[in-house]
Amino acid sequence: MPSFRVDYMKDSKGLAHYIEKKMAPGTLQGVRVRHDGNSLVIIIGGFMRRNGKRYSHVIQQVSDSLADYILKSYEKEILSRIIHRICNGLPKRDLDEINRIACKRLYPENMTENMIKERRRLISDKISEYLRTSRNLTLEGFITFRLGEYVKKLEVEVDRAIRQYFVEKQYEEYINLLTAFIRMQCPRVPELHVFVQPDGSYRVQGADPFDIPDDITRGYGIDKGHPVIRDDDFMIGFLLTCAPIRIFIHHADKFKNKELLNTIKTVFSECVLVND
């Protein structure tokens, strides 16, 4: 009877139970999965030939089950090792943040089966290829030495997480700089109203009796009769110059540049969104 063995030092009994649970009931007919010390043994009964269709189906089912187990039990550990290897020397806080971002990318809240399908396929194909030529698989050694393509997929996600982390860090430093700057400024326009226009521009006006000073409107090329700012970068500079105590954003839902809106809300703590 054809059979093969999977060595697993950590918990071979738990792995045997997991394989039995994951394999389709129809596949288990004539197949026995038993625990034997630090191994699980899969025995294929009957007159199944190694190059036969039924045998190939059993191999595929076992490979898929082992791939699921690796994803469930090892992926986060592998991810952590990759991060520590690539980011060697970074403080623990940075490593933890990169790990958080990578996990968020790999396991989003609305994660679907398709999001992990490719990683599962890479692992399953390698296991299936190996079991067709060998009767003994050492699971941890296989993970370490045989899953290079799968590990490269994780390395790509880690690389993206690193870039995202440093972009976020630069943005945080930028926000801190703007916040510190605005705290040192003397308000030129105590209360400022910003009306988001349908074309994405911004009409700005003070509140009586405090209008926008002439030197500011001249400096930013704003027409007093039609005070509109069209450039997002100009908008930030204009707000910093006005240094208002309170900003009212009208039609905030029409803001096309959501990052700009978030920046304004963060830097100017007294920012009121008005949906009129």
Image (tube, rainbow, N blue to C red):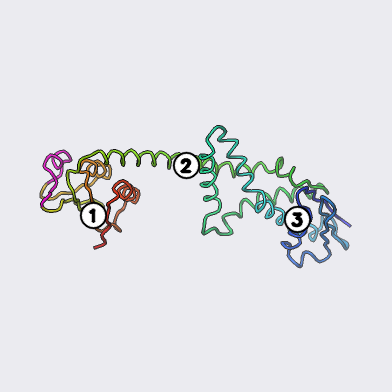
Q: CA distance from mark 2 to mark 3?
A: 36 Å
**Location of residue 80 in the rendering, given as x and y in whole percent from the top left corner:** 60, 43
Q: Are marks 3 and 1 in contact (CB under 8 Å)?
A: no
Instruction: Label 3, secondary structure: give it.
Output: helix
Label 3 vs label 1, nearer the camera: 1
Q: Which residue is mark 1?
A: 248
Mark 1, other Cα within 10 Å: few <14 / some 14–19 / many ≥20: some
Q: Residue drawn at (25%, 38%), measured in percent from left and top? A: 184
**Which numbered dot is residue 165?**
2
Label 2 vs label 1, nearer the camera: 1
Q: Magenta-highlighted stretch: main secondary structure?
A: loop
Instruction: Label 2, secondary structure: give it.
Output: helix
The quadrant of the picture occupied by the N terminus is: bottom right
Residue closer to the observer: 66 or 241: 241
Three-letter amino acid code of the residue under disc 1: Phe
Relative to 220, does residue 261 appear above or below in the rendering? Answer: below
Q: Which residue is mark 3?
A: 15
Q: Residue drawn at (53%, 47%), measured in percent from left and top? A: 100
Residue 183 counted in the magenta span = no
Three-letter amino acid code of the residue under disc 2: Tyr
Q: Residue drawn at (60%, 40%), measured in percent from left and top? A: 82
Q: Are marks 2 and 1 in contact (CB under 8 Å)?
A: no
Quarter of the rendering containing residue 158: top right
The quadrant of the picture occupied by the C terminus is: bottom left
The span picked out in magenta is 209-223
